[in-house]
Amino acid sequence: MPLSRRSFITSSVATAATLSTTSRVLGANERIGVAVIGVNGMGHAHVKTLTARQDIDFVALCDVDPAALVKAAKTVTSGGKPEPKLIPDFRKLLENQEISALVIATPHHWHMPIGLRAMAAGKDIYVEKPASHVFREGRLMLGMAAKEKRVVQHGSQMRSSEVTAKAAEVLASGVLGEIKMTKAWNCQRQENPKPIADTDAPKGVDYDLWLGPAPKRAFNRHRFHVSWRVFRDYGNGDIGDDGAHDLDLARWGLGETTHPVKITAHGSSVDLRAGVRECPDNMTVTYEYASGKVLIYEDRQWTPYGLHGVDSGNAFYGTKGYMIFSRRGYFQTFLGEKEEKGPAIGEKGRVGSPLAQHMGNFLDCVRSRKTTNAGAEVAHLSCGLIHLGEIAYRVGRVQKFDPKAEEFPNDKEANALLSKEYRKPWEV
């Protein structure tokens, strides 16, 4: 089950709940064979993190772009490790018995088509956010992890942050009273790519494999590195990009361990510059839970300023006070009618990322077979907010949701968006 705020305080490195598994518990000195799939962008950050560790064998790097592979291999060898195998097709990794842990940092549309196959092949997975590209994939992830007794870590690295642990102490102390509403926001200045002509794929790139389960299309640079995020075939817009972190923390702060029962969403494109973005450049979503508690999400992608002084943050509203929290490494509480400043930590500027701690938690759990700080259920519930919010926006009406059945009662249009079609042979 997801960690409560109180249990998070005493178990921020690894929870005490052990997975029922036939996988062997590893000794402290046994090395873990690791591979990374998708080594550009965030994947390269994971390559750096893993290269710095002394308790793993870097077995392989995998990417459809040979230039990204060469760059990542240089990072590994510069860090003093032998050059890993360079593999363009992830299926070769599933056959490799040297690999017990896979890090998946591809575009979103590949996360579960790879993750499900990896777990079925006996691999533990660290999967970048959002773990699921559509809602149904989250349920399939939970089922596969339970069936194959696999360790899953979701890329919600703030679950392993000291700042989050300190915030948990404050929330658990009762100084803010009962938290009845939370808010998540992501406000940044992002470019809206201008239309450009299709071209041939870069030399050596297996573009058909990059597309994978997505519809077949001609190569376009905007649909490749970095800017693929604004296309629904591959990404989830801003609510599923940086917004994934803030939604996860908002749900954590609210203490809800189920899906909401009612979702209202609005979004639009107000940036007048012509571009190729398929997702809205601003979005506001309200989620209501059966308990009556409310979670609010807001993003704007055309502002040079944030909210409460931070571009990416949360507000936890209690009956006695509230907390402004940012995953940049900061929180400040305000107490009582006069909003007097209470417990606080850090500054509003960027601080060191908890990526290393989060990866460490994953590898610790690969050894011990314990549940990670952001396991499969945490991932499904938080990623579910992304998908439910996007569905409410796309159908354009208030949505009632059944958390137990995981469907919209009597709404075929909305239910159809819980899943998608997959290009063969990449069905999940």
Image: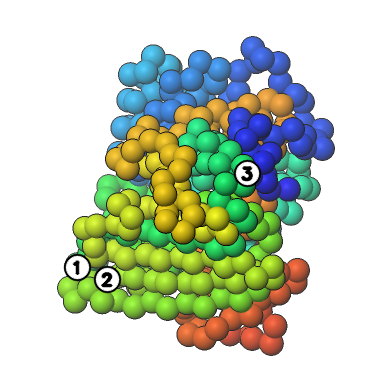
Q: Which residue is mark 3?
A: 172
Depth check, mark 3 against mark 2: the one in front is 3
The numbered disc on residue 194 is: 1
Residue 296 visible in rendering = yes
Q: Secondary structure at mark 2?
A: loop
Q: Mark 3 packing: few (<14 Cα in 10 Å), some, or many (20+)?
A: some
| Protein image colouring | rainbow
Amino acid found under the numbered disc labelled 3: Ala
Residue 305: x, y in percent? 24, 57
Disc 2 to disc 1, how far (Cα)?
6 Å
**What residue is shown at x 73% (from left), y 48% (from top)?**
1
| Proximity of marks 1 and 3: CB atoms separated by less than 8 Å | no
Residue 168 image-quadrant placement: top right
Residue 111 visible in rendering = no
The numbered disc on residue 276 is: 2
Q: Earlier in the sequence, mark 1 or mark 3?
A: 3
The residue sitting at the front extreme is: 338
- The front one of 423 and 291 is 291
Amino acid found under the numbered disc labelled 2: Val
Instruction: Describe residue 382's horizontal placement relative to residue 150 as left or right.
Output: left
Amino acid found under the numbered disc labelled 1: Lys
Q: Earlier in the sequence, mark 3 or mark 2?
A: 3
- The front one of 324 and 187 is 324
